Amino acid sequence: MKRTKTKNKARNSKAGKGTKRKNQLKTESVESMPKKCRISVNGKKYLTDKKYLLQGLEEIGFDIPHLCFHEDFEPLATCRLCIVESDGKLVTSCNTAVKEGMNVKTDTEEILEARRFNLELILSDHPLDCDYCYKNLHCELQRIAEKITKTTRYKGRHRSYEKDESSAAIMRDMNQCILCGRCIAACEAQGVCLLNYAERGFNTIIAPPMNLKISNTLCISCGQCTLHCPTAAIIEKDERTEVYNALNDEKKFVIAQIAPSVRSSLGEEFGLKPGTVLIGKVAAALKQIGFDSVIDTSTGADFTIMEEANELVERLKKRENLPMFTSCCPAWINYVETFHPELIKNLSTTKSPHQILASVIKTYYAKMKNLEPCDIVIVSIMPCTAKKEEATRITHRINNIPTVDYVLTVREAAKMLREGGIDIMKLKDEKFDALIDVASGAGQIFGATGGVMEAALRTAEYFINGKNKKERIEFKNVRGMQSIKTAQYDLGKQKVRIAVVNGSGNAEKFLNMIKNKELEVDFIEVMACPGGCVGGGGQPIPSSMKIVTERAKALYEIDKKAGVRTSHENPVIKKVYKEFLKKPGSELAEQLLHTKYMEREKYILKEK
């Protein structure tokens, strides 16, 4: 009975905190960072300049267990596993501010017993038959359970909830939920604020309003909740079975296309450092598990730039539907259609890179290979969960068949490679498909915030002036992880005022700035995920802004060394336009490479 009361009290406390807290990505400036403090830990003296005790202890070298804390968000203090003793009192180290002279203990029997007890309460919310722990390398709960307690399962009463598989992008299984609150923090940081604590006591749950299914809510499918969940309570909608079936169907010609950011993140799934670039080895690995062809989505990004830059130049000439917003991020598209349908006319109509490349494959490529489009299966390997939903859009079909058949996140692709027994580092590099085997540096920086803008400016300058200034092929003002970046560029015959926004939570702030006439811009790049695609909801776990930054740096290094650095100079792009599409904005290009958007219902009170 004592155990139940303690659990109920903890859950009631969680529910109260969840309704009040506003979580946003940390944006502390250097000036606001705390000064170094002297602290004593287990009798030894240390210096730390970290704001919170948990961060300071980790910097010193102590491994303090925690589930709810994430370095990109303000502390939640809900799991209570990070308990330490500070000046004689047990405290949660994640939200305890570092103070000069504080005396800390990390491993007394009282501390260890408190952690064990709290972990057992958390495990009581976790099902006995969870197989996620044994199939995934990143289950934080499993790692901590093996470390700090012998009893990794509590044999008390368990909750029972039906899985929510209504979304095309993500799946919720609240039987796996430990009520840590990270998904709430991630959703609030994205400006959607869809998730919160509901009910009380034993029945406490994290859910959308009125416990609606995800498909009936305002979810933009960005997947940041899946990226930060420490268990399997929220994960991407798994499409591996469908892909395996396609690979085993002898009648199908199965093509994998790899997003730009995947080359600098997939290695993390195999123990490599963030930013380790794997291009040839990824192509080799995918061919080894059965794909007939592997193609680089960065080439699709080059097509996107040709159409989008042309669209921008035309709008600037006519001064119509400005400012123009980029359209390659499906979660951003969802955000506009849901929260700001008045801006639909301002969105570029150009499809996202993987949709464009799929359109080219099922038309031009199919003809070159003498294949029937209906026999081609295209699997997009993406850093994004929203692209799963994007692939189901009725506007993304050619001759009544989907352009992209399946979308795998980086995590899903890595699972398939592990299931196939592939040791990726032992493979020899292989090239992409010979018909579509060149991507410009511009196409490859698409994965980083500011990359789309920079790529578009390079080609827009060429379209306006008929040439590029070599000394200004790089537009460095659009680079970096700042939430909102603005600049103005003189492209010769045309001045362009631009802005780059990353994180949909920051997009709302930016739109208010435009509404209040604090800013005037012509062209705006928005990526829904922090840092752009390198921080996408389908990327490897763990993820943080430090890791995201390393992934982005790797993409800019690729661009710097690329033989072709602008989309319009890509020989593959030139060939396809000459032989097939004719020119950017042509009737065929409009038909295949552009799309339409529509307003979504803002409030759905009835489940489908």
Image (cartoon, grey):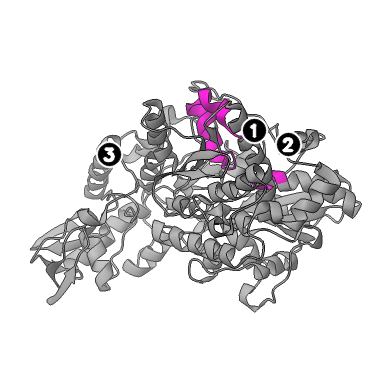
Q: Position of residue 458 (x, y in %)?
A: 59, 50
Q: Is residue 349 magenta?
A: yes
Q: Position of residue 546 (x, y in %)?
A: 40, 61
Tell me the amino acid under the disc marked 2: Gly
Label 1 residue SS: helix
Label 3 residue SS: loop
Farthest right residue?
Answer: 370
Q: Is residue 322 magenta?
A: no
Q: Is residue 537 left or right of residue 197?
A: right
Could you give the CA–CA distance between mark 2 and mark 3, rounded to whole angstroms?
A: 47 Å
Vertical arrangement, residue 17 with respect to residue 471, above or below: above
Tell me which label, 1 or 2, sits earlier in the chain.
1
Vertical arrangement, residue 604 with respect to residue 411, above or below: above
Q: Residue at x 52, y 39 (%)?
A: 495
Q: What is the quadrant of residue 12 in the picture? A: top left
The circle drawn on residue 585 is 2
The segment highlighted magenta reads 327-356
Note whether residue 69 is visible: yes
